[in-house]
Amino acid sequence: MTRAVVIGATGQIGRAAVDALARDGWAVTAVSRGGDRDPRWPRDVRVVRGDREDDAVLSAAVGGGCDILVDMVAYGDREARQLVSFAGRVGSAVVISSVSVYEDDRGRNFDTQAEPDGFPEYPVPIRETQRTVRPGEGSYSTGKAALERELLAAGDRLPVTLLRAGAIHGPYCRTPRELYFVKRNLDGRRRRVLAYGGASRFHPASVRNIAELVRLAAPRPGTRVLNAVDPDAPTVAEIAAAIDAVMGIETQDVLVDGPPVDGVGDTPWSVPAPVVCDMAAAQRELGYRPVVRYADTLPETVAFIEERLAGRDWREAYPKMFQAYGDLFDYAAEDARAGGR
């Protein structure tokens, strides 16, 4: 039996990755701040409580060595150097990055999207060879780029698979984009405004598909960068309809050409140009095949959101969502534009 250590084990990706590795025969040590155990994990998964930033905790978790170190939460060059310090005790690493590191050929990226004409226009699909933002400490994207740069530079000492995840979805997400439509349906809203004609595409990434990539990369050490997204990239209108189907709801879409107006028509997927990634490299290098499609995962995701919302204000249930997106449910403004519920 080979040994795996998973950092950030009780986050949304970590839970699925621990389960996938353990069921594939790995002896898994699951490291998290709470030291919790997911009830779905096999009983022989070892849990360790400790903070990601505590070098001593991670060193103790790695112990005399492990075959694969999987990091869900690494960010920035400091964490990269911390991982590289385990070279010699760790066979290889799998680290989660983000598609937000990409920039287009005019230097536009996720950090420039609020500027006039600032949203990037990527090729469709985006391949891993697409240029990336300059590494730095100024934003999430530049921090992930710094993480990637440090790890790739040390690939001769610690082979690393970097997984650039898209719009992550699944249970235990603290910022579930699906909340946008689930709450509207629960509130009895039967009309919704969608900007850009409802045609926006922001490639989703199921935690189960990401976990499958982790499982496949674990026994195949190498230094590589791979996209990590679902096999399909539905439009925002298609996502809304799929959520309606799960909840048994019929809703009328009010499609608006162009961008949101005073926030009306904006959704967590609404983008003026598609963000769609290519998965050919993962198929070629790892023999990857997706285990789920986006619609397959929705019943579990919707049920998780409904349970978390029960009897609670959405801002209390999902404070990070409110922090990231602001007031997503200005129904008065929507009624003024769309003509009622």
Image (tube, helix red, strand yellow):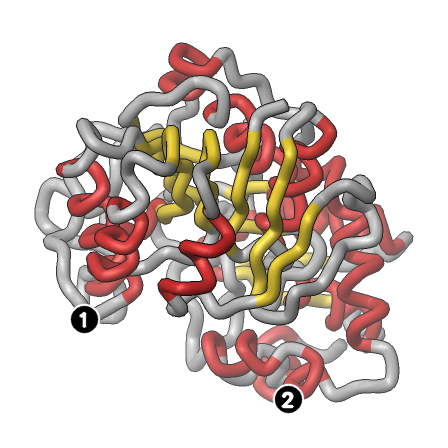
Closer-to-camera residue (296/42): 42
Q: Which residue is mark 2?
A: 332
The amino acid at mark 2 is Ala
In the picture, which quadrant includes the C terminus?
Answer: bottom right
The residue positioned 35% from the left and 45% from the top of the image is 99
In the rendering, at what x and y percent does residue 264 appear?
51, 75
Farthest right residue in view: 248
Q: Which residue is mark 1?
A: 138
In the rendering, at what x and y percent does residue 112 appear?
20, 64
Q: Is residue 111 above or below residue 232?
A: below
In the rendering, at what x and y percent does residue 74 appear?
37, 56
The residue positioned 51% from the left and 63% from the top of the image is 268
Q: Is residue 139 above or below residue 8?
A: below
Question: Residue 130: which quarter of the image?
Answer: top left
- Report the disc number at residue 102: none
Secondary structure category for the residue under label 1:
loop
